[in-house]
């Protein structure tokens, strides 16, 4: 049981770290669309934090997981309608948007891997479902951030779809 409690505590700390990083990135970027993206990511991380905290309390009190209620992610709803981020990378106090996204990608990947590992270890049906759902949500965050990276690198891809324009360039 101690291993499960430690895993939940580790997950809670990871969600807090991601939440604070995303809020910091949102505060320190000049691009309002990137700012909105980071705020949405922070809201999702806060939701994960609340779920994990409830599970930790339940496990400590009863020794059992409860069936967590996942609300639909704002990220999942917003991805299809996101507009392009400006092609210019705005410098912030200490890092560029590109650097912030690289850090965020690492956080999301680490969280996803951790949650998948915990799901494999778990014998409890509700715990397994929770860990898999959290891994899935972190994967959606990762994909959103990757799309932003592709756009900033000007590879011509946005949400894994090749971009093209019918507008005449003034170059």
Image: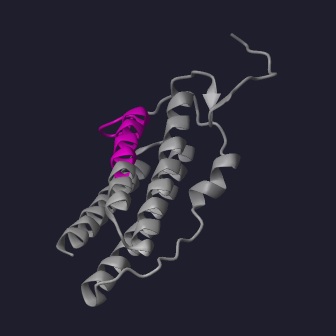
**Is 3 in front, or is 58?**
3
Per the picture, the main secondary structure of the magenta-coloured stretch is helix
- The extreme left residue here reads 2
Displayed quadrant of residue 77: bottom right
Q: Pick the residue in front: 147 or 117.
A: 117
Q: In this rendering, would 104 be left or right of 149?
A: left
Q: Residue furthest front?
A: 123
- Image quadrant holding the N terminus, namely bottom left
51 is higher (above) or lower (below) than 64: above
**What scheme was used to colour the molecule?**
one colour
Q: Residue at x 54, y 44 (%)?
A: 144
Across and down, in percent, residue 157 comes to 62, 27
Of residues 130 and 105, the one nearer the viewer is: 130
Q: Is residue 110 magenta?
A: yes
- Tell whether position 30 is magenta: no
Decide which of 138, 46 is in the foreground and name it. Answer: 138
Q: Which residues are magenta?
A: 91-111
Q: How far from the left and from the top, in percent, is residue 135?
A: 44, 55
Q: Is residue 91 left or right of residue 153?
A: left
Is residue 82 visible to the viewer in this orientation of the structure? Answer: yes
Can you give x and y, in whole percent of width and height, for residue 108 in the image? 39, 48
């Amino acid at each position: 049981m101690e291993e499960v409690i430690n895993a939940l505590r580790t997950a809670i700390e990871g969600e807090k770290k991601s939440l604070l990083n995303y809020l910091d990135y949102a505060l320190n970027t000049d691009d309002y669309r990137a700012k909105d993206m980071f705020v949405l990511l922070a809201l999702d991380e806060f939701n994960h934090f609340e779920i994990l905290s409830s599970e930790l309390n339940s496990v400590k009190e009863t020794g059992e997981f409860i069936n967590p209620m996942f609300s639909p992610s704002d990220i999942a709803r917003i991805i299809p309608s996101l507009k392009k981020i400006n092609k210019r990378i705005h410098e912030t106090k200490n890092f560029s948007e590109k650097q912030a996204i690289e850090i965020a990608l690492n956080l999301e990947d680490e969280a996803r891997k951790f949650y998948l590992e915990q799901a494999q270890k778990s014998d409890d049906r509700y715990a397994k479902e929770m860990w898999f759902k959290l891994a899935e949500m972190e994967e959606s965050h990762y994909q959103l951030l990757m799309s932003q990276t592709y756009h900033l690198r000007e590879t011509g891809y946005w949400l894994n779809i090749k971009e093209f324009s019918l507008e005449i360039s003034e170059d």
